[in-house]
Amino acid sequence: MPEVAFAVALSTAIGCCIALGLAFLWSGRTAAPDCVPDDGAASIVLEDGHLVDATDAAERLLLAGRGDARAEDVALARLEVRFDNLRASLASIARTGRAQLVSRDGTALLRIRADGRRVRLSMVDAETVTVAPGLDSGTLSEMERELDALRSVHDSVPFLVWRQRADGTITWINRTYLDTVAAALPERAGTWPPPALFEVGDLVADGATPQRPRRLRLTAGGTGEAGPWFECHFAAVGGEVQVTAVSAEDMVAAEETSRGFVMTLSKTFANLTTGLAVFGKDRRLALFNPALTDLTGLPVDRLLSRPTLFAFLDALRSRNVMPEPKDYRSWRARMADLEAAASEGPYTETWHLPDGRCYRLIGHPQPDGALALLFEDISAEIGLSRSFRAELEVNQAILDSLDEAVAVFDLSGTLTLANRMYEALWEVALRERVTAPTAGEAVAQWQARSAPSAGWGALQDCLTGRDGNEPCTADMRLLDGRALRYRVSPLPGRGTLVRIQVRPETQIHEVRSLRDSGRLHLRAEA
């Protein structure tokens, strides 16, 4: 997450800048060897443990950004960061009267003086630190303004940022952390040190910091109530651990939605009879369903080992679950072509297996580079198609054996079936045509090769069902004199059967009459 990386970098950089700025400000002030004046020193006065007075320097260095926390708690906590044994010195100050502590880095002194019920703490520069060349009051003012700007930036970021010791004691927090404490634990608002909102003790034990972000829930200061999720980043700063916590609620919700979607898909895939194998971008098996094991016979443990696509296909070949190739080299090239074709777009291939089964393989590329293979057993479908085709061939053979012309028209009036006698009678090759003729076109063809008759209109009405789809019979005569009898019968599904019989008897006088009138054209004998 870019915003998380930015937050971690920003919080770490600002924290370091604040620490360096404080050290530089403290080290930039000089003092006499034996007497340090209070003017300009960061001094606070405690009376019975409560803060009653503070210099301007103390307000800037020790009390800035404290929010609703008690001033004395904030000041002492910040002094504890730099001075060891502070609490012990305060506990004994009534007896000793005076104490002086040196900061851990040796750059500052903390002088403690008791005056009755009051205790004055003054933080000054150590005597061994010299003033940096060219450092004047203007430079110090500019540094203080920059330090205030850094504090403002740190308090304005929408992330929780805090620093804590290895024992879990929090030594610094930003405004967002303070606001979160007030919202989650209003009864603890304003106390110092503030309560811990996350259980990070085991993660930062012995001063170690996790190298990778950890997702933690806000625990509401140990109340046992589970709060929202945060992604916590850790960094070691000055012997302490700085933690940046960024809200991860949206990410967690998206992951839960994704898991629910995957679970729904898994349940759906588990009930499919089609085998599913999804290979990731690296071409390793990422997802499969139970139907895949049923269709391929591959053991589940083999599939759970996430084989590559080619290893998966090799396993299918070894179990005769794919067509046997003529040679291994051509088979590998063919499988590479299959992967390429399936990666470019939807790909379909039919596998006729040695045991008689028939599988349809469908490849679907996915937007993220994954490849989904679907295995469908179409043996029953192929068997049904073969049976239907065989039945049609038998029916066609039966029709071709009849000595009369037969034609079948469907509901729309399209010629769907005819025997060889029909093709021979009308000298047409219906099986070579791209489109089948309609009933009207067929009647026009019959009429063009027949003698004129008033019965053609009635025959067409009977054929198209205009007369109520009742059976009818009509006698016609070809131009060569042969007599034809048309029998039209309805079929189930509102189809129509037409049988055309060439009548053996042809009246000679009818033929002569037609010939004399010029309406009959006899073919010359060879």
Image (cartoon, grey):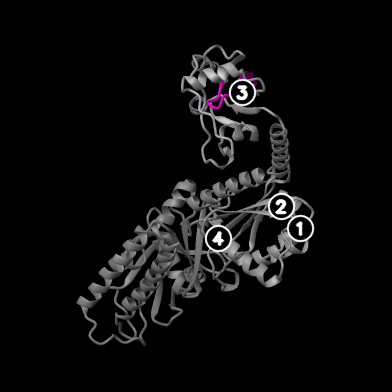
For the view shown, which residue lies furthest in the left direction?
Answer: 138
Is residue 116 at all visible to an observer of this figure? no
Q: x, y percentage for residue 331?
A: 67, 67
Amino acid of disc 1 = Leu
Q: Is residue 47 left or right of residue 465?
A: left
Determine the secondary structure under disc 3: strand
- To which residue does mark 4 refer? 341
| SS for dot 1 | loop
Q: Earlier in the sequence, mark 2 or mark 1?
A: 2
Q: Earlier in the sequence, mark 2 or mark 4?
A: 2
Q: Tell me which numbered mark, 3 or 1, is placed earlier along the sequence.
A: 1
- Measure the C-alpha gap from mark 2 to mark 1: 8 Å
Q: Which mark is residue 498?
A: 3
For disc 1, the neighbor class at 10 Å (few under 14, some 14 to 19, many from 20) is: some
C-alpha separation, residue under disc 3 versus residue under disc 1: 56 Å
Asked if the residue under mark 1 is in contact with the one under mark 2, i.e. CB atoms within 8 Å, the reply is yes
How far separated are the C-alphas under marks 4 and 1?
25 Å
59 left or right of 282?
Answer: left
Mark 3 and mark 2 in contact (Cβ < 8 Å)? Answer: no
x%, y% of residue 64? Answer: 34, 62
Q: Identify the amino acid type marked 2.
A: Leu
Q: Which residue is mark 1?
A: 298
The Cα atoms of the two marked residues, 4 and 3, are separated by 49 Å
Identify the magenta region.
477-495
Where's the C terminus, which quadrant? top right
Specify which label sits upstream in the sequence, 4 or 3. Answer: 4
Q: Amino acid at mark 4?
A: Ala
The structure residue drawn at horizontal position 51% and vertical position 18%, both measured from the top left corner, is 456
